[in-house]
Image: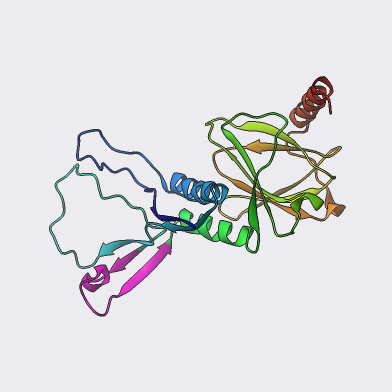
Amino acid sequence: ALIQSERGYASNHYDPTHGKVGPLKSTPTMQASYLARSYLVTALANVSINFWYDWIDCTITPPLAPPPPPGTLPAAEVGIATAKCNYSSVGYGARPTVWDVAAKPSYLAFRTIAASFRGQHCIGPQPMLNGTSDDFVVGFAAAADPRLVPPDLAAWTRSNRTRTVALALNSDVCYQVQGTLGDQLERVCTTNRILVLFLTQNPIYLHRASPQSRTEPIDRPFVTNAVVAVEKHRVRSGP
């Protein structure tokens, strides 16, 4: 079995090189996106266990040392929550105490991806009718033969621009779309078994839903043009 023993990404600006290279710039939103993508990529690589470092950004209260000089960048804040703690909480005492715990966006991303595909396994990248090596659509299924029904999907891109991709599925289906942090987005449905998705760097999760309340995508003319282009591609390329 493959194990990813330690992986993390900070939610703040910090400088691990102590001035040699300069600060690495990040935000809580970027950390949440990278956390979700890291678990999806390790699922693609068939990694059995993936440890995220760290759990809590702990502010030691009261402080054990004087504050750093003005202009000094803070340490990397790699936790998925913030909290205050006493001296023993860093491992030097028998009774650690943590309080004022507050979730960061990365905690919501962690909780969402853990719940989204519980009981399912990764069945690999799904073939797209267009797209580039920066675009990812990954299937998850619990069935012994996932080809029997369209799988649930996770989708994102490495590009800093919104990407439009299309997939040909084996049947018409509707999906409920969920955002990286668990927010419920629109429902999307196939047209003639073609599914069109808009991808950003923040992963979205698509779960099969009832087709009774089909909804049009937000940007209908753009989607129509994309479907027409895909159909032309299929005609040129053959079956």
Instruction: Please indicate whether residue 204 sits to the left or right of residue 45 in the image.
Output: right
Quadrant of the image occupied by residue 111: bottom right
Residue 26 higher or lower than 210, as above or below: above
The image quadrant of residue 164 is top right
Identify which residue is drawn at 21% across, 76% down: 93
Does residue 149 show up?
no
Q: Position of residue 181 (x, y in %)?
A: 56, 53
| Residue in the foreground of this view, choosing between 38 and 210 | 38
Q: Quadrant of the C terminus?
A: top right
Vertical order, 33 against 145 (above or below): above
In front: 148, or 69? 148
Q: Position of residue 173 (x, y in %)?
A: 82, 48
Whole-percent x, y for residue 20 in the image: 20, 34
Give the percent coordinates (x, y) of residue 85: 28, 69
Residue plotted at (17% across, 44% down) = 70
The residue drawn where x is 54% and y is 31% is: 159
Total tally of numbered discs in the picture: 0
Magenta stretch encompasses residue 98: yes
Can residue 78 be seen here? The reply is yes
Q: Which residues are magenta?
A: 83-102
Q: Is residue 205 left or right of residue 107?
A: right
Whether the magenta-drawn stretch holds residue 101 is answered as yes
Q: Residue furthest top?
A: 236
In the displayed structure image, the side of residue 5 where residue 148 appears, left or right: right
